[in-house]
Structures are given as C-alpha cells and as structure tokens.
Image (cartoon, coloured by chain):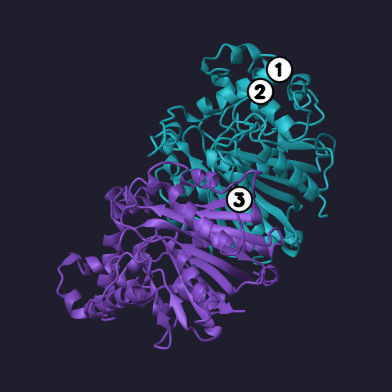
Amino acid sequence: MKDVAVVSFAQSDCRRDAGACNEVELVMPVIQQALQAIGLNSSQDVDFTCSGSCDYQQGASFAFVMGVDALGAVPPIKESHVEMDAAWALYESMLKISMGQAESALIYGFGKSSPGELPTVLSQQLDPYYLAPLWVDSVSLAALQARTLIDQGLVTEADMAAVVSRSRAQAKANNPHAQLAGDVSVDELLAEAPWVAPLRKHDCCPISDGASAMVICTLEKARAWGRPYAVIRGIDHRMESHNIGARDLTRSASTTLAADRAGVPDGPVEVAELYAPFSHQEIILSRALGLDDSTAVNPSGGVLAGNLMMASGLSRVGEVARRIMDGEIRRGVAHATSGPCLQHNLVAVLEAA
Amino acid sequence: MQYAAVTGIGQTHYKARRGDVSIAGLVREAAQNALDDAGLGWDDIEAVIIGKAPDMFEGVIMPEVYLADALGCNGKPMLRVHTAGSVGGSTALVAASHVQSGTFRRVLTVTFEKQSESNAMWALSNPQPFSPHLNAGAGGYFAPIMREYMRRSGAPWDTGIKVAVKDRLHGARNPLNHLQMPDITMKEVEESPMLWDPIRFLESCPSSDGACAMVIADEALAKQGPRPPVWIRGGAMRSEPTMYAGRDEANPQAGRDCAADVYSQAGIGNPRKELDCAEVYVPFSWYEPMWLENLGFAEQGEGWKLTMEGATSLDEGGDIPWNCSGGVLSSNPIGASGMIRFAESARQVRGDAGDHQVDGARTALGHAYGGGAQFYAMWIVSTEQA
C-alpha cells in the first residue's frame, strides 16, 4: 500500500438522541466541514467516495443510498460502500489510490443508534443458527470477556474503573464532541452497582448518534494543496474466529498481527486512539499493541466518551491525524474494531510528513 | 497498476431453496469450488473480500463476522462490500484492487444470497423513518421506468417476452441454473400472470439461493495456475443520486459513464463489434433493450431491434450474444447475481462455459446494476494480458 495523506477530518458531536434528524442530516454537516476545510465543495472535487454504515441501525435496507443523495453526485461519481465501520472504507479508498485509479478520496461513516436497542440489535450479528436465536447481546458477551480477564488475574475492576476515570477526564479536557465527560474518581466508579456483572454501566460505551468524514489523497496532491497533513504509513486489518469458545478472549491476537504488519513497532507511539467499546478492552488492546506509559492512550476519551457506531473507527484515525496536523505529535496509532469481543481489528500508523 | 487475472471460478447450484446447507455451507461450497478450480488450498489465499445485498435479506447483520470461519479467514483480512444489487460486481472490483494495488498477490472473493431464509421483497419494502412507504418491491419500482422506455422507443409490446424466452433457452444450456425451461414459448410467457404491468411473472427473475466465488491473482501467480488466466482489462463503478432534477431513469447517466470508462480502459471503441459476448444484469425482461442502448451496443431507441432480430441470442446465431448463462432471469441469488455475470464473462473468455460457450470468445463484458438503477459496476476480461 502506498503512503497516503490525511488532509482533513471532521466529526459531529456524539448525541444520545438526534431526534428527528435523519442520517443524511447527520452526515451532511461533517462532509461539508471536511471538504470546505481544504477548499473543496462536493464529491465532484475528489476522485473516489466511500462510506461505512449499517442498515440495522436505521432498521431498513439501504441506509447508505440516501447518503449518496447528500453528496452532490451529479454528474455521477465513483463511489463504493462497506457494511462495516468507515475505517474499512478508508482501507478500500487507500487500495484505490494505491492502484492509481484515484488521487483523492472522501470517506464518511454515520450511525443513528438511538431508534433501536443497539446491544440487542447487535445480537443478530452472531451465528444465525446457534447464537443469534439466544439473543446474546453485545454487552453480555463483553461481560463474559471481562470475567475471563478478572478470573485469570489479568485485570481488576479497579483497573477498569481507572480506564473510565481517565476517559472522562480526557474527554473533558480535549474533546468538545464528547457525550460523557467530567471528573469522576475510581472510588466513585467502583461504588456503583454492577449492570451486567462484572461490567458496571460506565464500563460500557454510551449509545450515540452522529457521523464523521475524512479526505485523503496522494502525498503529491497534499503538497500541491499546500495544507498541513498526516501520512498513513501503514494499515492492516485481521479477522479472528467467530467461535467465542475457541478464542483466547484475554488477548487480541489479530490486533498484534495487524500492528506488526502496519509497522507499529518501527517507532515510538506518542498517541494511540483505540476503539475499545468496553473499559477492559482498552487494556487488552494496549497490551496487544505493546504500548507502555510513554503512549497517551485515547486522549480524546475514546469511545467510552461517545460511540458513533460505524464511524468510531474512522474517528480514531481522524483523532490521531488531527493531532499530527496540529503539530502536537509526530507519530501515532489508530485502531478500529468490529464484531463481538474484538473479533476483527484494524490498525493504522500515522506520522508527520 | 499491477496486472490481475481471474485464476479460479466457483459457483453453487442455484435453487429456490438450498435447505441442504447453512449460509456458511453455501458460501463455503462456492469458495471451495473456486479453490479447486484454481488448484489451490485455503492457505494460498491472503485475503477474503465478501459481498452481498442488504443484511435484511437473511437477517444477519454484517455476516462476514459469522462467515469468517467458513471462509478460512482466521488471521486474514476480510472486507465486506455492500453497494445494493450491483454488489456482486463491485465486490469483484474491490477484490481486484487488492491485487492491482500491489498489496496482495492472491485473494478470494465470494458473494451470496440465501433468499429462502427471508423474503427479499418485504425486506426492501419495510417502512423507513421520515419517508413515504413504497410497498412495491423491485418490480413495482422498475415497471414505470420500463413503460417509459416503451413509450420513447416505440418498441413492439412483445420485446420483453422475447428476452424472457431467449434467456431461459440460454439458461437451459447451463446446469447450474435455478430455472430450467428448455421448452418455454412466447405464448407461455405472454399468458403468465401480469405482476407489475408491463412485467409478467415469466418476465421477472426468480428468487434464488446461491453463491459465486473467484480467485484473483497477480501476474506471476496467474501464469502458474492450471487454468488459462483471464486478464482484467478494465473495471469501473459509478453512482448517481436516487432523485435529482433531470434524472433519466430509463437511460441513466451513471450507466453510460461507467460503460465509457470501462471501454476506455480496455481500448474498446465499438462494444458490439469488439466484444464477443456480454453478461448483463437483466432482472426484468425489458432491461435488455434498455441496457443495449445504455451500454452503447445500439443507438438510442434501437436496442429492441437487436433483441427482436436475434442479435443477442446464442440459439439464433446472433453476433453479440447476451447472457449465454441464462442471466439473472434464470437464477437470482441477489448479492451474487452481479458476480455471476462477472464470473460467467470470465468463463466465456477461458473457453470453459460448456453448452453455453460462445465459440472463440476472447473479450467479454460483465455488468451489474443496483438500487433504483443508480449504482453500476462493470469489468472487461480478455485472453490478452494487455
């Protein structure tokens, strides 16, 4: 894969309920913001457009179709869609640029989770014959994973509360789009009752409505545009078995593999934005990536501060890119996940030009 | 761009209901057939690219998560494409980009639909928030567009019937097909119930279970395979909005632009003369004359003449046979239907299309469209590398 430049990123506020605002209305402002930041007007000004969304959030087939109506796709555009987090739309766009069929791409992801009960909806992502009929929701599966970690002495409930406390504090300090932010101590968190034991409600990401968008291009084009940019030096993603009982849930082997392929160990990691929907998963992922105290993990607060399902992975890349474009850091790592208990993981390495 | 070629093709039998296999069993069957065809094992595959139409057709959300084991993806990259009915074609193109970008040397791509697990028409028609409820399914959506084509072109009323018969006669040459109708007649189609005027029951595609898979490899690996490589000479996708002022739904600009792009990549000036055959997404009979014009095989208003003259018929010795496999009118596992077009164009080029082979075919078009005919994917494959 060729090195690609992130030249622009925008994300909406994470809101518990966007009300009558539909998906197109969620995505339009961030697309406009991402384009206008670099002087572009519509999808006509990029060579390729790719998005990520999930029909089951809206509860109807073809969630992405109306999104295309929002792009200004007249005359027709080169466009594609993944029924995955938009981080994988970024991956598809990078393939398109690497093969020479595009020099620039607009990527967006959106999700309106508020109309349904997201953890229950996600139970229908499981094996349709043996697991989905049991309606095992995503929180319960994550609780099983957390229990395994605690039982093996790899994580304590206090460790998990510390992740949440730090997320809230960093969201308050750094993230104007956060849904959950504030100062709350580990002791206060541990005093709360279990929700799906051993998880307390705060160990789980909130349910949010919103969208994010990004513009990427070749390094040549980024230099020609003359704006600050971050370089995606490596990107890789790896799948694991769907058979929860056959996986070691205390580790994330696919994250480690993707990280090695993406080149994470080749340099210092100043910032890591990890898509960890549950507090204990941030610990699993940090260990899988080999991070230590020299890395600032989730300075945005991560998805515990707001989870734009189908856009959160792209937002993790955007959060790292923004810090590089602002000159705060020179090298960082972004991660996206999909499936129950971190089944599928994507890792990207971003660096200053 | 790196060269890429199809080195393996695998399909399932298409049927109204494949009760003998799970969804995983269905995709596994197509994938295993493709690997066998390419003389490969699961370890030879570096990444898997999967596609299907809306998740509601089976009721499984993001099914790549569940299908990871069936497709040998543990420890591999797996990408799920969804671009409406064009997805079978788009998925093949996204898979090709994995190789053409130089990122991977050999990938597997699989598409499927198991329509018997649910009901596609109602999955397409459930009420959407903030939108008027269109309780029509795909046939009801496309019927007025076909009527507009009839009005504009002055095509004879039985053009659609001719297509329905022609594709089923083609289809009877292909043992994989869902519909096997070797004795079908114009009269039988005419007398079948009118579903959505002008579309009769036998002018409409069936609902099928099935899967289709291909192995796509780089230049060096393609030349080592047991089969002649089928080179991908061009690939293009286009999208336009569902609604905009001035949209020509009977001859969408996205289709015309997509065709122009793929012809230009493959150096095709006159598709009717320079292509040997085409596999084109025709789920309702009247879409053959409409696409003949949209894809530049005929002048505006003249597409029906090719159909009526038999130019697109293998049985009538036509010069540009369309849908020799039997097309979507003979089998329609929706998410796979586009990839079947792409795969069947590749079978023609490597000369192993059995009883529906076009003699000496060297260059062919694979085409897919989707949504309300606003999404397009096309490729051109050839025996010639460049």
Left or right? Give the position of B253 relative to A114: right
Name the kind of residue labelled 2 in the image.
Answer: Tyr
Q: In which quarter of the image is residue A184?
A: bottom left
Name the residue that disc number 1 marks.
B155
Q: Which of marks 1 and 2 is nearer the N terminus?
A: 2
Name the kind of residue labelled 3 in the image.
Answer: Glu
Distance (Cα) linking label 1 and label 3: 33 Å
Badge 1 vs badge 2, beta-carbon distance below 8 Å = yes
Which quadrant of the rendered structure holds the N terminus of chain A? Answer: bottom right
Position of A307 relative to B26 (above/below) = below
Tell me the tag on residue A222. none
Name the residue that disc number 3 marks.
A79
Which chain letter matches label 3? A
Hue used for the chain lettered A:
purple
Which chain letter matches label 1? B
Position of A217 relative to B249 (above/below) = below
Left or right? Give the position of B358 relative to A163: right
Residue B34 visible somewhere in the drawing: no
Percent of width and height locating residue B186: 65, 14
Tell me the tag on residue B149. 2
How many C-alpha atoms fall within 10 Å of the one at disc 1: few (<14), some, or many (≥20)? some
Which chain letter matches label 2? B
